[in-house]
Amino acid sequence: MIFIISTHSTPRFYKSDGGLPIQVDSIKFINEKDGYLLFPPVIAEPMQAISELYKAEIPCYLTKIDARKKAVELKLTGFKYLKL
């Protein structure tokens, strides 16, 4: 599953309408490991995150190509992909 995210220090997720990316507060991120900062942060519980993203109506894509097509269609700039 691929999600389109922002480039903020804490990733925000794009909805299918292309509006401003939203932060899903119920997703837990790991920002540091062994004293090193992780960028982008790693999602602590992927299955819980998928459930929360579904509740927040954040679309997922089966491939990076599908996600890219949607990002181009929405004319997004400054985005990245998150694979869960």
Image (cartoon, helix red, strand yellow):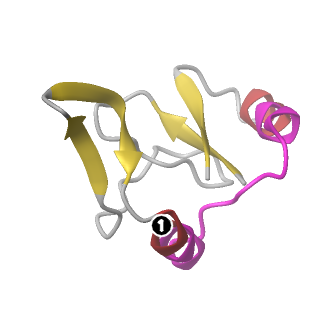
Is residue 54 on the magenta stretch?
yes
Q: Residue at x 60, y 55 (%)?
A: 15
Say which quadrant the N terminus sits in. Answer: bottom right
* Identity, as a three-letter code, of the amino acid under mark 1: Ala
Looking at the image, the residue that sits furthest to the top is 78
Residue 34's place in the image compared with 26, above or below, is above
Residue sitting at x 52%, y 20%: 78
Q: Give coordinates of residue 9: x percent, y percent.
A: 28, 31
Residue 34's x, y, as percent? Answer: 18, 33
Name the foreground residue: 71 vs 35: 35
Q: Residue 24 is drawn in which quadrant? A: bottom left
Residue 20 in picture, x, y percent from top left: 46, 43
Above-or-below relation of 3 to 78: below
- Assign a secondary structure to mark 1: helix
Please tell me whether residue 33 belongs to the stretch shown in magenta: no
Give the image quarter of residue 82: top right
**In this rendering, would 65 be left or right of 26?**
right
Q: Residue furthest left?
A: 35
Q: Is residue 84 left or right of residue 53?
A: right
What residue is pinned by disc 1?
Answer: 49
Q: Which residues are magenta?
A: 50-68
For the point 20% across and 36% down, which residue is it? 32
For the image, the number of numbered tags is 1
Q: Where residue 77 sits in the image (x, y, percent)?
A: 58, 20
| Residue at image coords 42%, 65% | 45
